Structures are given as C-alpha cells and as structure tokens.
Amino acid sequence: MTSLAVRSGGTGNTGGLAGTGTLLRFALRRDRLLIPVWIAVNALMVLSMPGTLEGLYGTPAERADLVRRMETNSSLRAMVGPVFGDSLGALTAWRAGVYAGALAAVLSLLVVVRHTRDEEESGRQELVASGMVGRRAALTAALLAAAVANGTLALLLTAGLAGQGVTGALALGTGIAGVGMVFATTAAIVAQLTESARLARGLTAAVLGGAFVLRAAGDSATDDGSSVLTWLSPLGWLENLRPYAGERWWVLALPAAAVLLQGTAAYVLAGRRDLGMSFLPTRPGPATGRLGSADALAWRLQRGAVFGWGMGFLLAGVVYGGLTEGAADLVGDNAGARRVVERMGGHSGLTDAFLASMVGMLGLVASLYIVAAVLRLHGEETSARAEPVLANAVSRLRWAAGHLVIAFGGAALIMLLAGLGFAVGYGERVGPILVACLAQLPAVWVIGGVAVALHGVLPRAAMAAWGIAGAVLLIGWVGPALDVPQAVLDVSPFGHLPKLPGGELQWGPLAVLTALAAALVAAGLTGLRRRDLST
C-alpha cells in the first residue's frame, strides 16, 4: 500500500515533483524559528569580525605581524586555517570562514533530514504521499528549504561585508553557502540510506567532522592551503577560494559539482526505494525484548548522541589544550587581543585566561547538546511514540525523568570528557582544568531547564529553546570581542560563572544557577503532568 501510494503521487506530473511548492512553504513555516536563528547567529559572527579585528590589529604593521606569526604557528592554522592577506576583509575570511561554513553545514543537514527521513519515520510522509504529491517532492522541498537558508545567509554576508570590498564579500558569502549546500545534498543521500533520522543526522555530522579533521591536518602541514588533505575537504575549498586575497573563482566549481553529483545520487536513490524503507535497513531486534523500563528505552534512544557528543568534546579538549601555548605566543604583546581573551577568561594570566575562554566556549556548545536531549521528549510526544509507553504502568514523570537524567547527566559527562581532553592536550594542571569544566554545568543546566519548562508549559513553543541557546551562544561568542556592556553579558547564565582556571571558585553563583535550573525543571514537569499530550 505504501509503495502504491507513493508511486501514484508521481503519475502524470513532471518528474514526480507535484506539490513541491506547497511542501516548501510548509517546511519554511515549520522552520520559521530554527532557520532565522541559525542564520542570525552565523551572520552576526561573521559581520562582527571586521570591527573586532580593527580594534585588535588597527595598524597595517600589526596585521602584517599577525600574518607572520600565523605562518609559523601550525597549531593555530589547524584551528582556523591559513591567512592569505593582511586586509580586514582577508582577516575576517580567515578568522570566521571555516566556522561559518561549518555552521551553515549543520543548519543544512538539520533542515534536510527533518523534512525527509524525519517525516518518513514519523509516518506523516505516508499520509502526505497519499494525496497528489510527487514521490520526489519532499526531497526537492527539503533541498530548496536548505537553499533558501543558505542563499539568505549569502545575501546578508555579501551586503554586510560590502564595505570591505564587494568582490571579496560575494566570494565569502557564496563560498559559505556552497559549503552549506554540499552538506545538504550529503544529508539527502544519507537520508535515503538509513531508516533512522537520528542516524542520518549523526552520519552526516560525522562526515562534517571528517571534513574538519582533513582540513586541519592539511593546514597544519602547509601555510598556503596547498595540502592534498585540505583539497579533499569542502571546508578547505572555502579557504582556498581566498576571499579578499585574489579570489580564485574557479574553486566554486568544486562545491557546484559536488552538489550536482550528490543531488543526482539522492534523486536516483529516492526513486528506487519504497517510502519508509532504506538501503541500509535497521537490524531486527532480539526475539524477546531487552528494554524492561522507560529509563532503559530513553537510554537506548539517546546513547548514540551521548557517545557522539562525548567523543567530540574529548577531541576538542585535546585540540584546544594543545593550542594553549601557541595562542599565548600569537597574542604576544597585543593589548587589544589580550583584553578580549581576559574579558572572556579572566585576568589571572594569559595562559589561564585562554584556557578559561576555551572551557567557556565548550560550555556554550554543551547548551546545544542539552537542548537537543531535552527536546527528544518533545519529538517522542509529537510523533505519538510516547503514547504506547504511557499506556502501560508508566507515569508521565517517570517517562520524562528517564530522558532528563540522560540530558543533564550527559551534559556533566561531556564536560568531564572535555576536561580530560584539555589535560591530555595541555599536559598540566589536571585538577584545576577539570574543576573549570564542571563549573560550567550550572549555566548549561539552566538552558536545559528552560527547554524543559517550554516543553511542559508551552509545548507549541518548545522549539524556541533553540533560539534561546543560539542567543546565549552569540552573546558568549561575540559579546566580549565587541566590548558590549557587562549588563548584556549578564543576560546569559554563563556571564555569572567564575573564570576558571586561575580565578576564585565562587560557590554562590553556582548554587543560585543550580537552584534556578531545578525550579525551571520542576515547572516544566508540573506543566507536563497537568496538560494533554501533543500530537
């Protein structure tokens, strides 16, 4: 029946695309919060860079000295890539390009998987396909939604950086959008191969991580982006486009070709499988069930994310720990750069300030993990998978508690692994670094508490937790560099944490934030207990 329903939708239309426009409008409406927030965070991060860099390296001599330092600092090249010019535009492309491309890739894979494999897994796509909808309409709409997001980002970056040079701005904006579309089509292929949306997101994210590692390995080996490893990575293509440094427009042919080839492969695969099926089917479970409780089910659903985030934080800690000495050498006697690092990490010495700022950045990223883990409750509820569980002798609070223990405990685990990674990479002061990482948890838990409260009290607004996490990330990432008032930094719970290592461990703010997180969780669970389930 499923196969007939899908194929009948493609009959009598051009290539099975009937209904694409309607599905595109629906996708954009569903993502009316996710897409604008991610675009805003990405665009503001890039557009704030020229002013920040001008404040740090205001003279041509200071910028030329920065370029010379980068040529001999392989560890920092691995982190942000080589620099190809000393203009503010070239430095902006160097400092923000790789990370902006990675953020565009993450948004693209989330959008494509959500509107393809997620819809099939929940059963909604089968209902849609029973109408006058082409069998490739959902895939087309998902890719078009990703194209709208990346195109909007490219326009914003081109317009915002035009003052530094229109040609360079167009190259940087187009290159970042190109990286986003490469991973959109990668996600489209993976969505055909797997039956699980979680696995599709995880595998595509793993490809992105591999691209970052290839670029980092190549850039650490050469100072001009010429390594074969760099050219094997879409992020390496972005830096070799060289915005504001003698643009190589022919490099854009690489992401264009990748999008064309991967998109074609995704369409071919979509036409050769039944709805809900995949080319890598999930292995059947044991004859007798092994999940004896709601807690065990929650762990089964979330363990992959916990392991993936944990390994990512461990590796990030190793990398950032290894960069500590090199970063201190790079800052040198530049008063502006020293002031930014100290504002992020405290005034206890440049090395401690850098460590504290990097630990704080990982804490901000951990807030994204806890939001994703908490909102798994929302996904289980809206997809009607929670009802069979709650139909048994399982209360709502017990069902929710299984997921929340993993969300809040998982945040503690990944920060602990980050601390161990720092200890390995830096090789000194294991105890203080571990304490610094764990001190981020009260602020992370507050963001998780906000997600719980939204899901329990205002389930229709639960996805707004992503917007709050994005705003906190933006404040913590860009605020210190822009020298925004302390009152703005204090809006974020991370603004109230002690600057560790090096600073004084203050228990008062940690206790207040922990109590606030507990109150938000209690409010959310109370609301969940009293309201009807969402569908």
Image (cartoon, grey):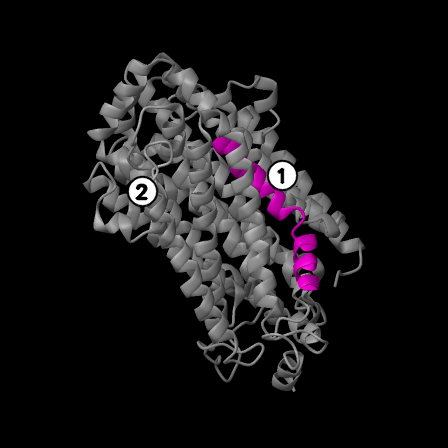
Q: Main secondary structure of the magenta part?
A: helix
Say what amino acid the circle numbered 2 marks. Asn
Report crowding for label 1: few under 14, some 14 to 19, many 20 or more residues within 10 A (C-alpha).
some
Check if residue 40 falls in the magenta segment.
yes
Q: x, y (%) of residue 67?
A: 27, 25
Screen quadrant of the N terminus:
bottom right
Screen quadrant of the C terminus:
bottom right
In the structure shown, which secondary structural element does the residue marked by tag 2 occupy? helix
Q: x, y (%) of residue 118?
A: 59, 65
Report which residue position mark 1 lands on: 468
Q: Nearer the viewer, residue 324 or 417?
A: 324
Q: x, y (%) of residue 304?
A: 45, 60
> Which label sits in the foreground, 1 or 2?
2
Report crowding for label 2: few under 14, some 14 to 19, many 20 or more residues within 10 A (C-alpha).
many
- Magenta stretch in the rendered image: 21-47
Compared to residue 14, the image places residue 475 above or below, namely above
**Residue at 65% over, 41% down:** 450
Compared to residue 296, the image places residue 55 above or below, namely above
In the structure shown, which secondary structural element does the residue marked by tag 1 occupy? helix
Quadrant in the picture for residue 293 = bottom right
The circle drawn on residue 240 is 2
In the rendered view, does 145 fall on the left or right side of 249?
right
